[in-house]
Amino acid sequence: MKTHKLISTFIIAAFALTPQFTSSIRAAGNGYSAKLLSPRLGQVLYPGQHVRIQWEATFPDLKNVHLCEMEIWLSLDGGRTFPHCITPVINPRVNYYDWIVPDTPTNAAVLDIRFGCELYYPESYSPQPQATFVIARSAPVPVPL
């Protein structure tokens, strides 16, 4: 009977420590959060358009942010997956990124503003589904006067 409990304990611990479970645990209540200011909910962006992504961020109480960084990831499926990193590594003291909208039409674009510090603080996620926006198929054609 004790062996059964020991095996059960190891299995539970193994699942609890896998990245898919620990990343969601770390994201909650870890001292980091971000709020996207631009683009806004429902905003329509066009391929090739220059857009300033802006956000506000709250960071954990870290005494040394020497190896900290931020990145912005793009979801085209409403935030279910974030396969596209759209920024280089960003200094956490910066709260904007000038972006050229890619030719990836979607009605459900969502950004994830990530933060982490090598060796000090794990990468933490802050998806922004409350600011879902549109990437249109092409720029509107001007009507001649």
Image (spheres, grey):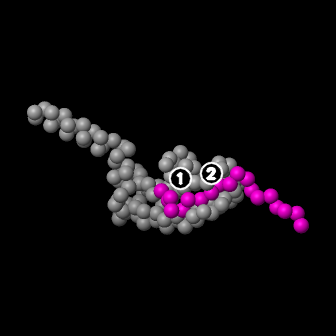
State which quadrant residue 10 falls in: top left
Q: Nearer the viewer, residue 118 or 28?
A: 28
Res. 52 image quadrant: bottom right
Which residue is farthest left? 1
Task: Magenta stretch: give its range.
Answer: 127-145
- Return the x and y of residue 93 as percentages of the image width and height: 49, 64
Q: Residue 35: within the magenta? A: no
The mark found on residue 78 in the picture is: 1
Disc 2 designates what residue? Answer: 106
Left or right: residue 137 compared with residue 9: right
Give how far across and how far down residue 48 sits, in percent: 71, 54
Residue at 19% over, 39% down: 9
Q: Residue 139, percent across and down?
A: 74, 56
**Residue 35: x and y, percent?**
48, 65
Name the chief secondary structure element in magenta. loop
Task: Check disc 2 and report its element: helix, strand or loop.
Answer: strand
